[in-house]
Image (tube, grey):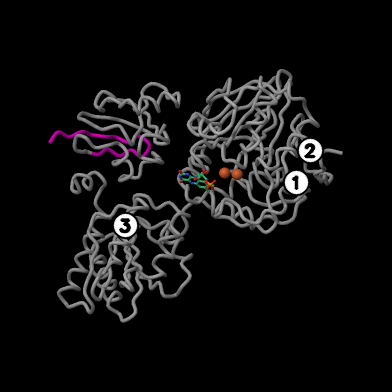
Amino acid sequence: MQTGTMSTRPAPAVRVRPGQAVEIAERVHWIGVLDPDLRSFDIVLSTANGTTYNSYVVRGDKGVAVIDTVKEAFAPEFFQRLESVCSYDEITTIVINHLEPDHSGALPELMKRAPQAHVYLSSRAPMMFKALLKSTDVTPSAFTLVKTGSRLDLGGRTLAFYQTPFLHWPDTQCTYVPELGLLFSGDVFGCHFCDDRLFNDKVGDFGFSFEYYYAHIMRPFRQHVLAGLEQLEPLDLQLIAPAHGPVLRQNPRRYVQRYRELATARLNDQAVGEKTLLIFYISAYGATRRMAEAIATGAEEEEGVRVSLYDLEVGDVSPFIDLIETADGIAVGSPTINGDATKPVWDLLSSLHTIHVRGKLGAAFGSFGWSGEAVAMMEDRLKGLRLHVPFEGLRLKLVPTEEELAQCQELGRKLARHLVTPPGELFAEAT
Amino acid sequence: MPKAKVTFEDIGVTITVPAGTRLIEVSERVGAAITYGCREGECGTCLTQVISGGEHLAEPSVLEDQVLKDMFAPRGHRLACQAQVLDGDVVVKPA
Ligand SMILES: Cc1cc2nc3c(=O)[nH]c(=O)nc-3n(C[C@H](O)[C@H](O)[C@H](O)COP(=O)(O)O)c2cc1C
Ligand SMILES: [Fe+2]
Ligand SMILES: [Fe+2]
């Protein structure tokens, strides 16, 4: 009925059955739930065929551990599945790799049913753990904070913890079973894909879902992904058991490699050793456009800065998001229309949460007729995203004069100079 | 104005800053990997390990102390959004 094989022989297909756990390795079972009807997740994600909330049980000679739980609405199904492989009084250990409600929803109830179980969570998690339990009648009697290097011996099955903060919450961690080369990776290497054949070598093609999940959940934390991979890549990985989507038993390392590829800056080799400044504008009559061009001309005077100019009128901003991810600075220009900046600019500035922009250099500019609100509004947005905006935005009335264009060039020069100034001097200069 | 030197060990950058600067302000400017959430000293995500020169940081406030306690932070750890650099040399890295 079940299989836990990791050999190259084709494994027999299993299907998830109601009330039945699925063995994924020796003395390790999947006790998650399928949610085939889900179409939208966390507001920011969509999925064509639902998702799964994966939870697992690891049985050792000295103890039984439950790794993660499921969304609250699915708790009854989860408990049924759990009961098919262990009784509540056997559970010694509950590991929470991630406190988001899709994995911790059934946790309070599990803690009630297995009050003797000891909870293990990341040392970054206690504040959130408290916030999660504050609306329930459960108070944790015993919990231990773990970090990379912490280990727990269940008897023949060891749990080794790897703290991977911001993949994708502060509290996220992975739990590894060295005896099996098995990684419980939480949301990492997961995806929203629901298929009752469960294993990556049996389910339908989920490549798109895997990439989509990375792009929407992990990408904003690129640096943290790289730091996490440094810890996970050296592990012997026979099996990856994420918290959503297929269990990765065939060529699990491929998914780790893919994360490495996705997190490695693209196209950076075009401007090796140079700083990059991107100038975006939109312009109805050409005034803001001329400002943009003048800023570019000024910036290009600085050695070692690669300047690019883009008209946002083309519509789709997604290619620009990729560019901004690897750029060092951006300047954004819009005329004021009815007291606001224009929609293409807001489309751009409201898409930046999918990448890491904190600390990049930012600036705003634009032409206006009489009130000129756009520049300050764009500037506030850049600051709100924690870009560094050291130079006041440039607002010019209607058609720029030669003298005003010279101011634009000067702004361009200042931006470029800022980019090539070493951080140490920069701080002194700005304070 | 008194100045202090802060070194971010993870990226190997040393910076001179005016007294009273909070660690987080410097770290975000130079791109050190210290992350932060609320900046109000409540969420604890900017936990930072002080490798040396802890005595050159202003004493933690009651609030910061409480959060460090709630997080079971080991000794020599501070919240980057709270800790102000006073003088001398301080070496830090993300916790
Ligand atoms: C993808 C994702 C990203 C999040 N990012 C943040 C964040 O940056 N800062 C924060 O304070 N909370 C963040 N949260 C936590 C949510 O704000 C929190 O779970 C909240 O309670 C959800 O409220 P709701 O029930 O109204 O959806 C994030 C949650 C998700 C799902
Ligand atoms: Fe999550
Ligand atoms: Fe999740």
Disc on res. A184: none
Q: Nearer the viewer, residue A239 or A285?
A: A285
Q: Is residue B81 visible?
A: yes
Q: Earlier in the sequence, mark 2 or mark 3?
A: 2
Mark 1 close to ligand 3, CB under 8 Å: no
The furthest residue to the bottom:
A285
The residue that mark 2 highlights is A22
Q: Please state the extent of the stretch shown in magenta in the rendering.
A: B1-15
Identified at 39% across, 40% down, the residue is B36
Residue at image point 54% right, 54% down: A215
> Mark 1, chain letter?
A
Mark 2: secondary structure: strand
Q: Mark 3 = which residue?
A: A380
Q: Gap in Å between the C-alphas at discs 3 and 1? A: 47 Å
Q: Is residue A90 left or right of residue A415?
A: right
Tell me the kind of residue under disc 2: Val
- Residue A198's tag is 1
Of A323 and B11, which appears nearest the observer?
A: A323
Evaluate whether residue A242 shows in this view.
no
